[in-house]
Image: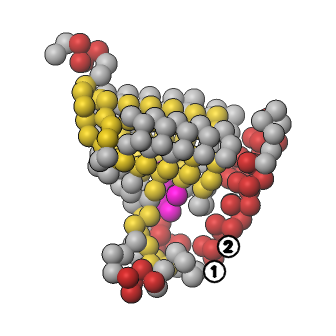
């Protein structure tokens, strides 16, 4: 298996020294830089660049503010009506999926990579990645960090400055470090 195939299969792979992965990251980071330096009024140009960065996203159906950064781009899937505020970073070594009408506040990070705890293994450049899945109608406040393998259920709200280490069910308000469910929201909460 190639290192990219290992990455996509969720296995340990060489993230730091594999020439193909290094080249893919450099290519998309240059595109991100171009996108980030493009004026907001240049909507046609911004969408064209965004289509190159995110080939699996309808660039006309989402709104992404600069700066924006990804590792690969092709592992990112965004539903229609999704909004990413300034300074969003998506470490998409594994799939990052945001449903429809997901609002992401400024300075948020989505991290799929896991590194070995053992320093010898870590120095070899080994990494593993687990996907992140955000359902429809989720609101993620500013400065939120979402860690590998996390799923957030439909309609939930993640409060600002949260560190999301575990799955969050649907229709809840959750916040904190680590993030925890505080209360149920929506029509179901009114019936309880």
Tag 1 near tag 2, CB within 8 Å: yes
Q: Magenta: predominant secondary structure element? A: loop
Q: Is residue 98 above or below residue 21?
A: above
Query: Where is residue 74 drawn, in percent x and y?
Result: 59, 56
Q: Which mark is residue 23?
A: 2
Which residue is located at x 64 percent, y 34 percent? 63
* Residue 52 part of the magenta segment: no
Which of 38 and 95 lies nearest the eye of the viewer?
38
Query: Where is residue 151 drawn, in percent x and y?
Result: 35, 45
* Residue 95 part of the magenta segment: yes
> As drawn, is 44 to the left or to the right of 118?
right
Read off the residue under disc 1. Answer: 19
Residue 133 seen by the camera: yes
Q: Residues within 10 Å of mark 1 (few under 14, many from 20)?
A: few
Could you say whether the residue bearing mark 2 is in a helix, strand or loop?
A: helix
* Image quadrant assignment for residue 128: bottom left
Could you say whether the residue bearing mark 1 is in a helix, strand or loop?
A: helix
Which of 37 and 135 lies nearest the eye of the viewer?
37
Which residue is located at x 29 percent, y 15 percent? 187
Q: What's the magenta region? A: 91-96
Q: Which mark is residue 116?
A: none
Q: How many numbered discs sit on the rendered protein?
A: 2
Residue 79 seen by the camera: no
């Amino acid at each position: 298996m190639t290192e990219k195939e290992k990455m996509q299969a969720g296995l340990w792979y060489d993230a730091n020294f594999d020439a193909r992965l290094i080249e893919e990251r450099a290519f998309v980071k240059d595109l991100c830089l171009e996108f980030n330096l493009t004026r907001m009024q240049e909507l046609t140009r911004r969408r064209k660049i965004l289509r190159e960065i995110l080939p699996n996203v309808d660039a006309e159906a989402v709104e992404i503010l600069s700066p924006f950064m990804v590792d690969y781009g092709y592992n990112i899937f965004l539903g229609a009506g999704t909004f990413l505020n300034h300074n969003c970073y998506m470490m998409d070594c594994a799939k990052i999926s945001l449903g429809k009408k997901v609002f992401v506040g400024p300075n948020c990070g989505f991290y799929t990579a896991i590194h070995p705890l053992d320093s010898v293994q870590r120095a070899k450049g080994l990494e593993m990645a687990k996907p992140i899945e955000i359902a429809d109608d989720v609101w993620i406040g500013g400065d939120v960090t979402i860690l590998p393998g996390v799923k957030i259920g439909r309609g939930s709200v993640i409060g600002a400055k949260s560190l999301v280490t575990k799955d969050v069910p649907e229709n809840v308000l959750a916040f904190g470090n680590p993030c925890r469910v505080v209360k149920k929201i929506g029509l179901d909460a009114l019936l309880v």
